[in-house]
Amino acid sequence: MESLVHSVVRGTNELFDRLPTGGLADADADTDVTKYQRTGISVRYRDEYLSSRRLPPSVENPPVKSDSTATSSSIQSTNAITAPTPRLMITAGGSGSGSRFAVTDIDDEIQKVVDGLSVKSLKAKAKKVKKPTRELVLAAAEQSAEAARNLPPPPGQQIVRKRNYEPVRPTWHAPWKLMRVISGHIGWVRALAVEPGNKWFASGSVDRTIKIWDLASGTLKLTLTGHVSSVRGLAVSSRHPYLFSCGEDKQVKCWDLETNRVVRQYHGHLSGVYSLALHPVLDVLVTGGRDSVVRVWDMRTKQQVHVMSGHTSTISALECQEADPQVISGSMDSTIRLWDLAAGKSMVTLTHHKKSVRALALHPTEFGFASASSDNIKQWRCPKGDFVQNFNGHNAIVNSLSVNSDGVMFSGGDDGSMRFWDWSSGHCFQKFETIAQPGSLESESGIMCSTFDRTGFRLITGEADKTIKIWKEDDDATEETHPIDFKPTLSRRNY
């Protein structure tokens, strides 16, 4: 036993006393370390896995129980097979290769593991990490910046570079001139409406009468009386032979144009009714006035469908259209409201104006409208009421707005000023003052209402000098005789 202990101690001392030191060369040190790794792997492999490589013979070849003799013989054979196998020894020293350590009787499997380890270590040492050069650093920075630009900004931090403002070039329009002056009313003309056939138009006045005029000749065809105060709104139905009127006497009347009599009256307003509009598809009438509510009436039953409240002052303008928002109202509280007709509630409230909104106008073909106030005229886009642009330059109390399908918008002021605008660019291509009829005061040259006929080639204005004037485009004008005086500016208000 002592001899066995001495031999083990001697082998251990010989193994660990010969480890490489810092004085050896690097190549010899790497070789020695690899040999030590081989020795350790072979030892662990034999101690842990070699004995379990194969199943025990008793499991691999189970005995056949034929008789007692066979059983006893199988037991003896099993005991003989499962006898412990002698361990292999690790001896130091080499035969002739010059190595200080060698592993005796290394199997092919151990050799494969050792060879694989050596190959991996050699590859890891051969792989060199390149130091980043200036070009690589710049390229990586540019690549990361490009990826950051492509990422969407976080919510609430969408910083978008403001695009350069490029003014829209206005479309050329022929100037307008006076065509005819119609006299007949003995008070301010406050309402106008053209019938769908474009053969006649109606006018309502402060003299409490409604007059029907022939559009081609300008002759008086009919006078309707029934209101006891000023007539402020008129509308001709395109689906029924009805004319609707409203006035400061709190009355809303439906006139049958076949009998020229009032067939229905709509009661409910608490004060004067200043505006009136017809729905283009539904049998619905919308009115608004000094009681600050928009009332929706069933045309046939005379019942109130909705009483839409929200404005805090007089409602001075109303417009109806087929698509949402189906009702648009302008009030003297300087706000515009877009209404949901089905729910009877306000969808959007526009608070851009600083003064009373006195006029609204829908574009015949585009899905938008314009609003007029004494501060400026604004263009909006439906259905959400998005702001488009301002029409600057009409410094007056604008009482009336009208737009035709050619993109010409007219605005009439309380002081008689008239402006013609290009709808797309907001450029004012013509401006002048109306002329009061002889015998009237100069202060009576005010535009109270206006409308284009169904073709858009005639403009009808009702004025404070008790006349109705019809305007038309100058047929002799060309782009050479009347060039566009367009001077764009770099500044543009977005509110």
Image (tube, rainbow, N blue to C red):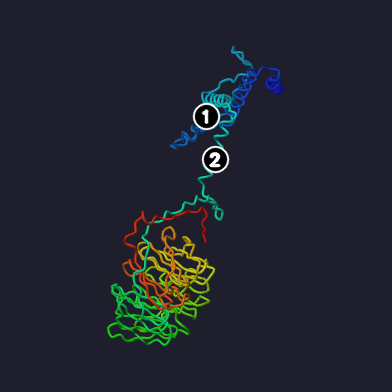
The kind of residue on which mark 1 rests is: Ile
In front here: 154 or 116?
154
Sequence order check, earlier mark of 2 and 1? 1
**Residue at position x 48%, y 85% from top?**
270
| Residue 385 in the image, given as x and y percentages of width and height | 46, 65
Q: Which residue carries the number 2 mark?
A: 144
Looking at the image, which is closer to me, 72 or 110?
A: 110
Q: Amino acid at mark 2?
A: Ser
Furthest-front residue in view? 439
Q: Is residue 367 left or right of residue 127?
A: left
Q: Residue shown at 40%/86% (left/top)?
A: 227
Depth check, front residue: 316 or 409: 409
Q: Which residue is mark 1?
A: 81
Query: Mark 1: which secondary structure?
Result: helix
Q: Quadrant of the N terminus?
A: top right
Residue 447: quarter of image: bottom left
Distance between the alpha carbons at the discs numbered 2 and 1: 69 Å
403 shown above or below 55? below
Q: Nearer the viewer, residue 454 or 153?
A: 454
- Across and down, in percent, residue 481 comes to 36, 56
The number of numbered badges drawn on the structure is 2
Q: Residues within 10 Å of mark 1 (few under 14, many from 20)?
A: few
Query: Is 444 situated above or below 266?
Result: above
Q: Residue 214, image x and y in percent?
A: 29, 76
Mark in front: 2 vs 1: 2
